[in-house]
Amino acid sequence: MRRRAAGFKMNNIHLRETFPPGSFRFTALMSKRLTRRAQEMIERSLPHFPELNGHVITVGYTRKHLGSATVIYRKGAISGLAIRLKVRKLTYQTIGHELTHLLQGLSHARRSRARAADAAKIPSGEKQCDIWTLARHELFCDDAPTYLRLPRVMRESWPAHAAAVRALCIRAINKRKTHRRYIRWLEAEIRALANAPLKDVPPHQQLELPWPS
Ligand SMILES: [Zn+2]
């Protein structure tokens, strides 16, 4: 009896080990389309999302969008997490964005009355998703975010601005604790950042610029 019980316990541990903290399962279509590069990018992204530990994330393929994310419910409980990615020109930005959507979904599911817990939750919304993705890790700053308002000049030379925008996103998340309009604040700061080099130009030269500021 005892031995059996011990054996059973070990089986349980073993079972858990076959699903390591936060792992992926690729759909049949994705398995066909998946490149080594894309797979490595997905695998490298997941450890930055410890909140997804213990979940198996189904990764599907999409051709239409950059990506999508779904939290699947059955009888009011989460029964699965899924993201879809476009393999061609895949960026860490997109992977991070979709994984952050999963966290937004989980935040909704684990609705808690504790105010303290609210601050740690990621609010829903696309811009919010962009902000929390950029803030999470510099890995996810390899491409400009889709929904956050960025001046065109910044979008066109994103790598030069990525670190500064990420720093602003981190500040915005902190600001959210006291400022309801933290996204507006962030977008204004980003605009100011894009215009910053102009401040170094003597005023008479600024007048010669072909575009009004
Ligand atoms: Zn999105």
Image (spheres, rainbow, N blue to C red):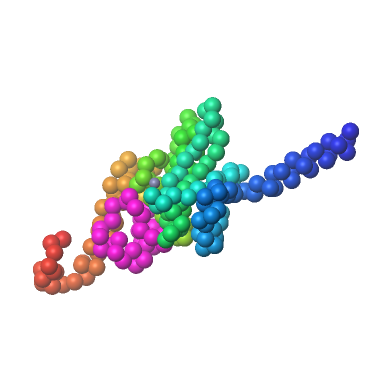
What percent of the width, then of the height, locates residue 169? 37, 53
The picture quadrant where one finds residue 78 is top right
Is residue 133 visible in the rendered image? The answer is no
96 sits left or right of 210 in the view: right
113 sits left or right of 26 in the view: left
Q: Quadrant of the C terminus?
A: bottom left
What percent of the width, then of the height, locates residue 38? 50, 59
Is residue 58 visible in the rendered image? The answer is yes
Q: Quadrant of the N terminus?
A: top right
Residue positioned 25% across, 63% down in the render: 153
Residue positioned 69% across, 44% down in the render: 16
- On whether residue 141 falls in the magenta region, the answer is yes
Image position of 26 with respect to 192: above or below: above
What percent of the width, then of the height, locates residue 18? 68, 48
Query: Magenta stretch?
Result: 140-169
- As drawn, which residue projects farthest toward the top? 75
From the viewer's side, name the closer residue of 167 and 81: 81
From the viewer's side, name the closer residue of 125 and 121: 125
What percent of the width, then of the height, locates residue 20? 64, 49
Residue positioned 52% across, 50% down in the render: 29
Magenta segment, principal secondary structure?
Answer: helix
